[in-house]
């Protein structure tokens, strides 16, 4: 019983001796708590202008808040002279972090990729992109996946890691898009007339002066049944759907212009020639004589 009393007396003396340190540690923890809340709000407002994804904003702000709390806890334990305990906690956290990191390697990779994608200036929600064999409008960049809405209204969910490691084409980075049309005309056509007619048709239906470009026209080859050409022009567009519409319209207008001027767009023709060098009638007569 005396040993217990002595032990309690010792703890009391230590407690009284460390009252100033305990008070300082409590103040540090309280300040760290309110600082973490302020940090959460500040970071959320600061990155809110650059990151539209709420999940990513919350993650970044919570990480900043957690780091502030950890700093306060470290200072408080240092004031209380719990250095050995602090080293033990840090060592245990390090080992646990390695184990958890290996177990959740794929998930953590997608989460980190989602944060990186959110800070990219060349990729935002609403952009029309093409990546990993899919093309459509970016609907969401979440912590683990990337959502694309295709032209047929299907939603495609792609892991963030795949997007980060794969090349992608962003049609929304520029409002100018070039359209290429390949066609052919008959060998008897006036090539200079065809060239000028095609250029005039494109200029009439697609204003190239506002874009600051001009129509390009090149004959490319002597085909099997036609002389083929390539026509390129520019449109104002931010997605692949507008590109398809412009190409379709250009093909219709070129066909109308060619039909009006009696310019033929030939299709491949195969001629089959049957030759009969044998006299069929004489062969039939010989067979009848032999039969008699």
Image (spheres, grey):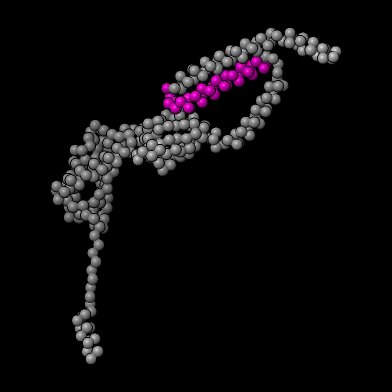
Please tell me whether residue 180 belongs to the stretch shown in magenta. Answer: no
Q: Residue furthest left?
A: 261
Look at the image and tell me in which quarter the C terminus lies.
bottom left
Q: How many marks?
A: 0
Q: Does the rendering let one see residue 287?
A: yes
The residue at the point 85 percent across, 14 percent down is: 1
Residue 263 higher or lower than 84, as above or below: below
User: What is the x, y in percent for residue 134?
Assistant: 40, 41
Q: Does the rendering let one see residue 217?
A: no
Residue segment shown in magenta: 49-78
User: What is the x, y in percent for residue 278?
Assistant: 23, 79
Instruction: Looking at the picture, tell me which residue is in the foreground, 45 or 273.
Output: 45
The residue at the point 21 percent across, 44 percent down is: 252
Task: Tell me if 61 is positioned left or right of 99 in this view.
Answer: left
Task: Tell me if 179 is positioned left or right of 12 in this view.
Answer: left
The residue at the point 49 percent across, 18 percent down is: 41
Q: Residue furthest bottom?
A: 292
Image quarter of residue 170:
top left
Q: Main secondary structure of the magenta part?
A: helix
Image quarter of residue 201:
top left
The residue at the point 34 percent across, 33 percent down is: 174
Image quarter of residue 5:
top right
Q: Residue furthest front?
A: 1
User: What is the x, y in percent for residue 65?
Assistant: 55, 20
User: What is the x, y in percent for residue 289?
Assistant: 22, 89
């Amino acid at each position: 019983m005396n040993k217990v009393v002595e032990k309690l007396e010792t703890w009391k003396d230590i407690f009284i001796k460390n009252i100033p340190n305990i008070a300082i540690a409590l103040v540090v923890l309280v300040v760290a708590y309110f600082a973490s809340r302020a940090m959460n709000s500040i970071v959320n407002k600061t990155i809110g202008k650059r990151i539209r994804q709420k999940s990513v904003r919350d993650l970044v702000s919570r990480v900043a808040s957690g780091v502030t709390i950890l700093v306060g806890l470290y200072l408080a334990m240092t004031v209380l002279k719990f250095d050995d305990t602090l080293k033990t906690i840090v060592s245990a956290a390090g080992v646990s972090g390695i184990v958890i990191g290996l177990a959740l390697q794929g998930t953590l990779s997608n989460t980190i990729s989602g944060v990186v994608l959110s800070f990219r200036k060349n990729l935002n929600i609403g952009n029309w992109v093409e990546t990993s064999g899919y093309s459509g409008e970016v609907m969401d960049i979440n912590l683990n996946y990337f959502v694309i809405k295709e032209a047929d209204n299907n939603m495609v969910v792609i892991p963030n890691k795949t997007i980060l490691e794969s090349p992608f084409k962003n049609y929304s980075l520029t409002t100018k898009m070039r359209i290429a049309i390949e066609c052919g005309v008959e060998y008897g056509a006036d090539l200079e007339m065809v060239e000028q007619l095609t250029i005039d048709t494109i200029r009439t239906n697609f204003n190239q002066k506002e874009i600051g470009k001009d129509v390009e026209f090149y004959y490319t080859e002597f085909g099997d049944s036609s002389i083929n050409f390539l026509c390129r022009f520019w449109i104002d567009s931010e997605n692949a759907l507008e590109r398809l519409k412009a190409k379709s319209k250009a093909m219709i207008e070129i066909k109308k212009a060619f039909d009006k001027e009696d310019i033929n767009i030939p299709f491949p023709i195969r001629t089959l020639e049957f030759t009969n060098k044998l006299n069929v009638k004489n062969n039939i007569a010989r067979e009848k004589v032999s039969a008699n």
